[in-house]
Image (tube, grey):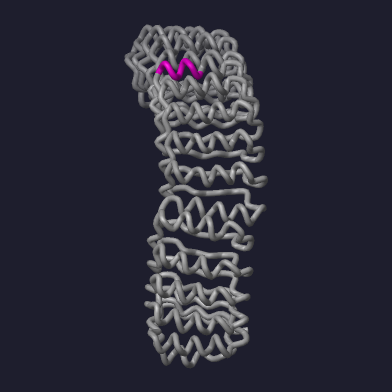
Amino acid sequence: MITWNLTYNKIGPIGVFYLGETVTTLNISGNNIKDKGVEYLADILRCNKTLTTLSLSDCGLEASCTQRLADALRTNNTLIFLNLSYNQIGPRGAQYVGDALQNNSTLTTLYLGNNRIRDPGVQFILNGLRNNKTLSILDLRHNGIGSRAVANIVDELQNNTTLKQFELSGNHGDCVAIGVTVQFRNDRTLTTLDLRQNQIESTSVKYIADIIRTTTSLTTLDLDFNTIRDDGVKYLADALQINETLITLCLSRNEIEHCGVHYLVDALKNNTTLTTLILCGNKIGDIGAKYISEGLRNHQTLTVLNLKDNQIGSIGAQNLVEGFHDNITLKQLELFGNHGECIAVGAAVGLRNDKILTTLDLSQNDISPRGIQYVADVLRKNSTITTLILTHNQLRDSGVHCLAVALKDNSTLVKLHIGNNQVEDTGAYDIASVLRVNTTLTELGLQTNKISDQGALYLAVALIHNKGLQSLYLQQNAFGVVGGQHLVGSLRSNTVGSSGFTYVIYDFVVTT
């Protein structure tokens, strides 16, 4: 067996002549072999009894070159792989290839991408496939194929049962959908369909919906970054009412608004298989959030719902809180990029339903006192979270009060960081009240707030009898030497024991 990979050299026609007749795999892509070189290759194809793979991508081939190769293919009975992509064969070259396919019974893979065959060229290829029973992979991507060819592709391939991979990306939006329709019809083992960034519009989705209706193997469908809009979602929703296999559906960045969400929610009311729904980067707004909260209130299978960047405001957040109040299956509700309260709502749902979550980082999310109330309500009964990070938000004293009330009942939280939240003395008082009774908290971050000498005193008094806290971060607050003295004095009376106690008070560390 001889394999020659001679890509992007300077092999000319004479070089092709000396390639020999015993080679099995030949790749001379990126070489300017010209008409004479193709003539030598055609002779090799006629006489060679071993060549199975031939790659001629980016060789500057035109229609006349294709004619010589196609003529040789009529009699060749060994070649199974032919790559002619990135040439200029055009519609006429496609005609020669199509004619050769009618009688060829060995070729299984054909790459013709980036050849400008356009609509007429597609028809010639389709003509060749009418009676062809061996070709299983056909690549026609980026060929200037338009909408008029779509109907012909559907008609011509409706009885084809051998084509299992039909690549049409980079052509008219409908082409991509048609290609995957053929694939799924002929290959019943496919489980994943990735159609991200394919310029698929609402009209194309009807072909994909047909797959969802009839497939018994598809579990993951990714349509992110297309333009299917509400009308396209309607096609998908209708199909989902029948489908019993799809587990993950991704529809991010598709210009979907509240009507599209309504279609989806109605379809999912009776669906028992979908566990993950990704809708980030759309425009569902408060109305869409209301549809979701009402429609999925009692849904028992959905565990992941991504609604990032969807123009949801405080009204939508409140609807989601009420809608998912009794839901026990949704473990991940993503609401980042919406109103600040939305993030807290998503976190609260995750806290309640995810029984293995131990760390929750909600830093830099503009969470307000009202938003943190949602988290605090769940934190009171949570038994898994050990680390809660809330730095760089807008909690203020009223938000800290909500947390303090919850932490008096919580017995699992070990680390709490609420630095940079505009917390003042009243907030420090509430935290101090927690420290008097809480025995599990070992690390507390209160840095970069507005705690004065009085707030430092509240904390110092509480720390005298606290036996759990080992690290307290208070740098960049508003207290001075007096407040610092109160805190350092509490070290002498603190009974934390031999494990030691670390204060970061100003910009230095004080350790017992």
Instruction: Please state the horizontal and vertical placement of residue 59, each as a whole percent of the image.
Output: 40, 77
| 468, above or below 457, in the image | below
Give 428 or 397, whichever is nearer the viewer: 397
Q: Is residue 327 left or right of residue 63?
A: right
Give 463 or 384, whichever is nearer the viewer: 384
Q: Is residue 512 visible?
A: no
Quarter occupied by the N terminus: bottom right
Residue at screen point 47% across, 92% down: 17
| 250, above or below 61, in the image | above
Q: Is residue 357 left or right of residue 252?
A: right
Q: Which residues are magenta?
A: 314-320
Residue at screen point 40% across, 84% down: 33
Identify the image quadrant of residue 315: top left
Identify the image quadrant of residue 428: top left
Give 432 or 341, whichever is nearer the viewer: 341
Q: Is residue 321 magenta?
A: no
Instruction: Please state the horizontal and vertical placement of residue 510, each as a whole percent of the image.
Output: 44, 23
Instruction: Please state the horizontal and vertical placement of residue 174, each as a whole percent of the image.
Output: 45, 51
| 59, above or below 350, in the image | below
Residue at screen point 57% across, 44% down: 210
Residue at screen point 34% across, 13% down: 479
Identify the image quadrant of residue 484: top left
Tally the marks.
0
Instruction: Please state the horizontal and vertical placement of residue 83, each as a whole percent of the image.
Output: 49, 72
Q: Please name the predominant secondary structure of the magenta segment in the image.
A: helix
Q: Is residue 155 visible?
A: yes
